[in-house]
Every structure is written in structure tokens, then in C-alpha cells.
Amino acid sequence: MIAIMEALRAAAQKFYSSLDAQDWDAVGRLVTPDFVALVGDGPPMALTTWRERLGTFYEGFPDGHHVIDEYVVGEQAVATRCRFLGTHTGTFQGIEPTGTEVSAGVIHIDHVIDGKIVRHHGQLDMLGLLSRLRNAAPS
């Protein structure tokens, strides 16, 4: 059981480091062909659609990356509590660059089968993130 838990944690670590490196080939190797991402209350997304959505984050925050605070591992899933850190140097959600450094709380739950992620659930504090940017934006 410990080996399984360590493998799940390792899968999550590789997944988030590959996302932050924007190494989409590596991300593609870490997920199953029928991978589904569920973010907030949005509709299920295939990897290609999710990648486009993530692209807007990395355009707005080119140095954006996850800082992992904690992993909680179950039998076939790993929950990751982390923060998305970055500097707002690109347009994001219609907000021109402010140069603001942000830290947004994130909870991810990834379901893993045979070492590959089949389903990703993500919840980011978008309200806090946008509020910080709007308060920093010039009037």
C-alpha cells in the first residue's frame, strides 16, 4: 500500500512540474487518452481544451508555478493543496499587466490508474486572484 501511495504522489509531482514547465508532451504522457479535467463548475474538458485554458494563465503569468503545500493520498487518488504563484506581466481575463505578484490558493484532486491521471478536479481562488489584479490595475 505504501508503494502505491508513493507512486500516486510521484504522479502528481511529475504532473504539476510538467504543467509549470509547459511541457505538454510530458503532460500528455502522464494522462490517459480519455483524460478529463473538471475545473470549478465548468464543463468537463479533454486535455486539448484544458491546455488552451491553462495557456491563458501562463500568458498572464509567464513565471506562474505551483508551490505544493500538501499531498493527501488515497487508494486511487491524490489531493494536492497548493498555491499558484506568478507575476502578472501579460494580459489575463482582459486585465492589462500590472506587475503584481499573486498567490492563489488551489485544491486539486487527481484520479490515477496504472500510474496515469484519468481525471483532474481543480479549484482555484479565481475571485481572490481577479480582485487582487483589479485593485492593482491603474484606474
Image: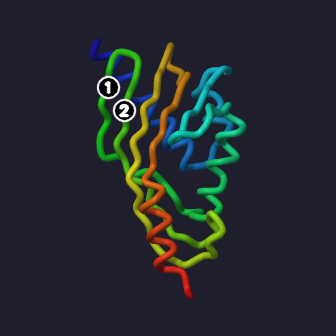
Rendered residue at 50%/72% (across/down): 133
Vertical relation: 132 (above or below) 9 = below
Picture disc at residue 101: none
For label 2, the SS is: strand
Compared with residue 117, is residue 40 higher up or lower down, i.e. above or below?
below
- Rendered-image quadrant of the N terminus: top left
Residue type at mark 1: give it: Val
Around disc 2, counting alpha carbons within 10 Å, would you say few (fewer than 14), some (14 to 19), or many (20 or more)? Answer: many
The residue shown at (67%, 31%) is 46
- Horizontal side of 3 relative to 36 (left or right) equals left
Circle on res. 79:
2
User: As shown in the figure, which amino acid type bears the numbered disc 2?
Assistant: Ala
Which of the two labelled residues, at mark 2 and mark 1, occupies the earlier sequence position?
1
Q: Is residue 47 above or below residue 116?
A: below
Is 58 left or right of 67, judged from the image as shown? right
In the depicted view, which residue is nearer to us: 78 or 42?
42
Are dots 2 and 1 in contact, CB under 8 Å?
Answer: yes
- SS class of the residue under badge 1? strand
Read off the residue under disc 1: 73
Q: Residues within 10 Å of mark 1 (few under 14, many from 20)?
A: many
Q: Which of the 4 image quarters holds residue 61?
A: bottom right
Provide residue 2's location: percent of width, then percent of height. Answer: 27, 16
